[in-house]
Amino acid sequence: MFFLKDLPSTAMIAGVTTEVPEVSPPRVLHVLEQLRAASVLMRRIDAFLRGHGLSQTQFLAMMMIVREPERDSLSAAEIAARLDVSKPVLSKALGSLTDAKLIARAKVQPTDQRQKGLSLTAKGARVFASLLPDYFALLQGADM
């Protein structure tokens, strides 16, 4: 998260970067403003999802499964490859989703009983679909 509420002025940035001519103080300030806006948005998304009993990792794992309509399930490794989270964090999120009966194990290959995938349950599909409009509205209203 980005925690600066009061950003430095372009004059302050210019004053400390006089020895670095390639630094553009207005550009640096613009990036700082974007970081602050992104952080505010992330906090709003966190609060929204927490209000529905989900973390961002859980929600995004569900999104990875849903966004592949030609497939019924994804393996945990496939979900991990699509998300920028550690394996322990993802494992905990997937376990919580399973415990909440929002996802369930499914066979990926009928010929290979060892390979398992994860799919949304009917409950998981309903929960996910009910959150998407407000989630996208949050993104739409972001000041970026």
Image (cartoon, rainbow, N blue to C red):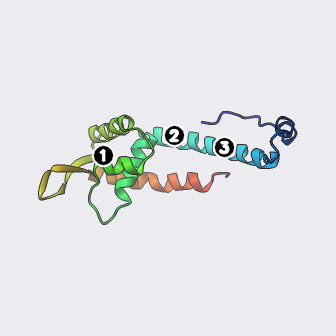
Which label is found at residue 102? 1
Q: Which residue is at the front of the view, 24 or 105?
A: 24
> Which of label 3 and label 1 is nearer to you?
3
Q: Position of residue 129 (x, y in %)?
A: 40, 56
Q: Position of residue 121 (x, y in %)?
A: 27, 51
Of marks 3 and 1, which one's residue comes earlier in the chain? 3
Of marks 2 and 1, which one's residue comes earlier in the chain? 2
Q: Find numbered disc 1 in the image and state the secondary structure of the residue it sits on.
A: loop
Which label is found at residue 35? 3
Which quadrant of the view contains residue 4?
Answer: top right
Please report the residue visible at 57 percent of the width from the left and 53 percent of the height from the top.
139
Q: CA distance from mark 2 to mark 1?
A: 19 Å
Please report the residue visible at 75 percent of the width from the left and 48 percent of the height from the top.
30
Residue contact at pointers 3 and 1, CB within 8 angstroms = no
Count of numbered circles on the image: 3
Mark 2 Cα-neighbour bin, 10 Å: few <14, some 14–19, many ≥20: some
> Which of label 3 and label 2 is nearer to you?
3
Residue contact at pointers 3 and 2, CB within 8 angstroms = no
Q: Find numbered disc 2 in the image and state the secondary structure of the residue it sits on.
A: helix
- For badge 1, the amino acid type reads Leu
Q: Position of residue 102 (x, y in %)?
A: 30, 46
Mark 1 Cα-neighbour bin, 10 Å: few <14, some 14–19, many ≥20: many
Residue placed under numbered mark 2 in the picture:
46
Horizontally, is 38 left or right of 80 in the view? right
Q: Which residue is at the front of the view, 25 or 1?
A: 25
